[in-house]
Amino acid sequence: MFLSFYITDLENALVFQHLLSYDSPSFMSLWTKLQAMAPESPNEDGWFKLSISRSLQVYRYKSKTSKLIYWCLATHQSNPLEPVVFLEVFDNTLLQYFDKEHLTVSKMINNHDRIALLLNCMVDSNEPAVTDFNHLRDMVPSREDLSKVINSTASSLSNRIAQRNTSQVFNIGDPTKDPGTKEKLVPWRSAGVRYSNNELYVDVVETIHVVLRKSRKTGEVASARGTLDGVIDFRSHLSGNPVIALNLRLRGHELGIPALHQCCLDSYKGRPDQLQFVPPDGKFQLMHYSIDLDSLQSRSKLFSNIGLVSPDYRTELGDLGDEFEINVNISGSQHTKTVDDLVITLSFEPLPSECKIKVMRSTHGHFENCAANNVGKWVFDRETLTGTLPVLRGCLENATREQVRTLQLSVSYTNKGELPSGIKVDSVDILSGLPKNIKPFKGVKYIAKTGDFHLR
């Protein structure tokens, strides 16, 4: 069972704490114990679990989008992943509730009351309870919605009192139930939703995970492992209860069995390229899919699906064989003018202290040496034009040919307007549930980014 929740910044300074029991420790005392037991663990990325006594465990989850860390103190769990999953859901709930791409410390501090109310709804009797966002939004309205509820309640009470007085004067029975009472059509959508500006946005995001292997004999680059991890995010601000049809152009890719939002499950017929649903109100993830690049039959087709940036390198150059050259092919595109925040990380096997990476020339960006003498970063400008061929020439001072030969590259970048897979949204149609005089604005955005992208 859960005993307490804490939120800190990346420096482990307390931002928010919620104690579910009178004897739950403050974060300061908990942090002191953590440092004494495992001083290195709290600095790790992702999440970790630590037993601090025979019956107590601490769980830590680092937000993927915000510079925040979520903590949970709980008794020993039969399912050790339950607290971690709950912390991740809590983080996503806060992002949706405040309608932000990321959360700041000031935002959290200024909304302690909202966060505490949400946690009170999400946890009941020290166990997970309500996690559906639309239910939570109904239970804890935003400040603007809450003021509307108060004003509406005050108006309804005054009208009801006036009706009662009138019925008493004219000897009329109790008034019937308000005919305007709204009921939910589906559990994931709020009742009686109305917007002055009806809008619908679709974001398709693909993350590239690929490990490329370079043959030392032939110099040919081949794929050791490759996948594309994709999500389709919706932001729906539509009045009433619309039925939406989403049609995708899959370019011959098999999406397998994608993870779908519950709004699609009843109408899903095994065709991920044709979906019909009544959307939740606000932002939600419609689909999560994965494409196995290793299943592609030809080498050319595989390399056409790993994004716009293709790295390559040569080693053992120069008179001493201690030089290397990195070539980056940024493919031209009709849909994307630039790649953003491109960084090529160079790494060698551990080197003696006298060895050092030195750049002789580069056509783009600048080079940054890291604290370790076997790692460096080729950092490009914020935007780099597509259709270019950047080159960096360098040497590994005081190194042998064998040490230069251990060069490996890691690639990081994002681009908008085009997906590695080539998947596109063919159409987003509103089949019913929206008045004919309303013409909603529709927007579609494509984003590609790298996850684990390595050339070895």
Image (cartoon, helix red, strand yellow):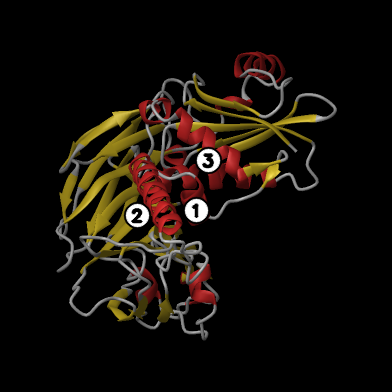
Compared with 244, 360 (above or below) is above
Instruction: Determine the residue located farthest toward the right in the rendered image.
Output: 54
**Label 3 belongs to which residue?**
118
Give the residue displayed 46% in from the left and 28% down from the top.
112
Q: Secondary structure at mark 1?
A: helix
Compared with 321, 282 (above or below) is below
> In the rendering, at what x and y percent does residue 59 appear?
66, 34
Looking at the rendered structure, the kind of residue marked 1 is: Phe
The quarter of the picture where the N terminus appears is: top right
Residue 115 visible in the snapshot: yes
Question: Between residues 390 and 41, which one lies in front from this camera angle?
Answer: 41
Question: Between residues 76 and 165, which one lies in front from this camera angle?
Answer: 165
Q: Quadrant of residue 33?
A: top right
Q: Comparing marks 1 and 2, which lies closer to the viewer?
A: 1
Question: Between residues 448 and 117, which one lies in front from this camera angle?
Answer: 117
Disc 1 or 2, which lies upstream in sequence?
1
Q: Quadrant of residue 439?
A: bottom left
Q: Secondary structure at mark 2?
A: strand
- Residue 385 placement, left or right of 118: left
**Label 2 belongs to which residue?**
449
| Mark 3 neighbour class, 10 Å CA radius: few under 14, some 14 to 19, many 20 or more | many
Disc 3 or 2, which lies upstream in sequence?
3
**Label 1 belongs to which residue?**
133
> In the rendering, at what x and y percent does residue 448 appear?
32, 58
Looking at the rendered structure, the kind of residue marked 2 is: Lys
Q: Quadrant of residue 398?
A: top left
> In the rendering, at what x and y percent does residue 442 appear?
22, 68
| Mark 2 neighbour class, 10 Å CA radius: few under 14, some 14 to 19, many 20 or more | many
Question: Between residues 28 and 314, which one lies in front from this camera angle?
Answer: 28
Give the residue displayed 63% in from the left and 17% down from the top.
26
The span from disc 3 to disc 2 (Cα, nearest Å) is: 32 Å
> In the rendering, at what x and y percent does residue 78 appear?
80, 46
